[in-house]
Amino acid sequence: MNSPDNGATEPLVRMRQIRKAYGAHTVLDGVDLEVDTGEVVVLIGPSGAGKSTLLRCINGLERIDSGEILIDGRPLRYEEKALNLVRRQVGMVFQHFNLWPHKSVLDNVMTAPVRVAGREREEARATATRLLEQVGLGQFADRYPASLSGGQQQRVAIARALAMRPMVMLFDEPTSALDPELVGEVLAVMRDLAEAGTTMAVVTHEMRFARSVADRIVLMADGGIAEQGSPAQVLDEPGSERGRAFLRQVERV
Ligand code: ADP
């Protein structure tokens, strides 16, 4: 949000000193993260580092124990009405796409805009049709999810999230459940979104994608941020031992 006073731009997502524990297990231990408008932030790091939890905190799917989250300058609150608004502002794509099996592809994309956002059916249909074309599935509008490949279903899920016109898109390991030959088509859609200026935070193990698409890479380990910076800084010159240890384990990119 632009401040009229000083012209400075508030980050679209600002997380300050986020703490989150499951029982005695502290998963996020005072994390600060900002995502600017139009920025693509890619979160990497070992399994269990808290990447997914951090992402889920941004749209209120997980409730933080302490700290503060601001979306477009407004503090995240956990009342139902406030959460519903945040979920419209913050789109999310999961590892498992969970399309409605009994609805057509088109209906999967246009149902929430009509039912949740109160859009006119015809307007929602036109938007859904355009988004399905954008993700390369215009000809599949009348099909049912079960007749689509996993990669195609995930592209429908991306269109479904975009249909709410979110301010920021979160991707939580969107290609992890896919057969290897289907990963590329989903990454290509995400790359297009990034190039079109979509604000994105992405958890992924796809290092080549991270290197080529990220404006900033955040490497998480042990409930905190071990490294962050440009892809070259983080992937080629990690300053921390935790960062180096993780990068030694992933395949060279
Ligand atoms: P990452 O995405 O980096 O692999 P996660 O955020 O998924 O890490 O998980 C961080 C830690 O929190 C893990 O140890 C995981 O087992 C634990 N965890 C995640 N979700 C829950 C939950 N709902 N209940 C209990 N523990 C959880």
Image (cartoon, rainbow, N blue to C red):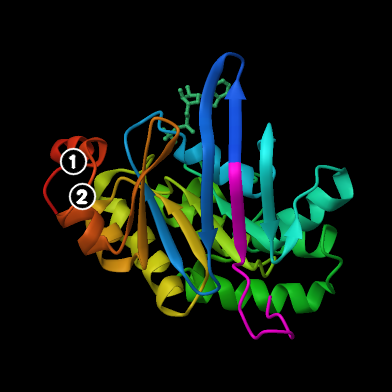
Classed neighbour count for the residue bearing mark 2: other residues with Cα under 10 Å, few (<14), some (14–19), many (≥20): many
Question: Label 1 belongs to which residue?
Answer: 244
User: Residue 54: where, in percent of width, then height?
Assistant: 54, 42
Question: Label 2 belongs to which residue?
Answer: 238
Residue 209 in view, yes or no: yes
Q: Which residue is drawn at 65% across and 58% down?
A: 90
The magenta segment is 1-17
* Secondary element at tag 2: loop
Q: Is 14 colored magenta in this rendering?
A: yes
Proximity of marks 1 and 2: CB atoms separated by less than 8 Å: yes
Left or right of 119 on screen, residue 105: left
Q: Is mark 1 within 8 Å of ligand 1?
A: no
Q: Which residue is drawn at 68% across and 47% down?
A: 68
Residue 99 in view, yes or no: no
Frontmost residue, 30 versus 223: 30
Left or right of 150 on screen, residue 34: right
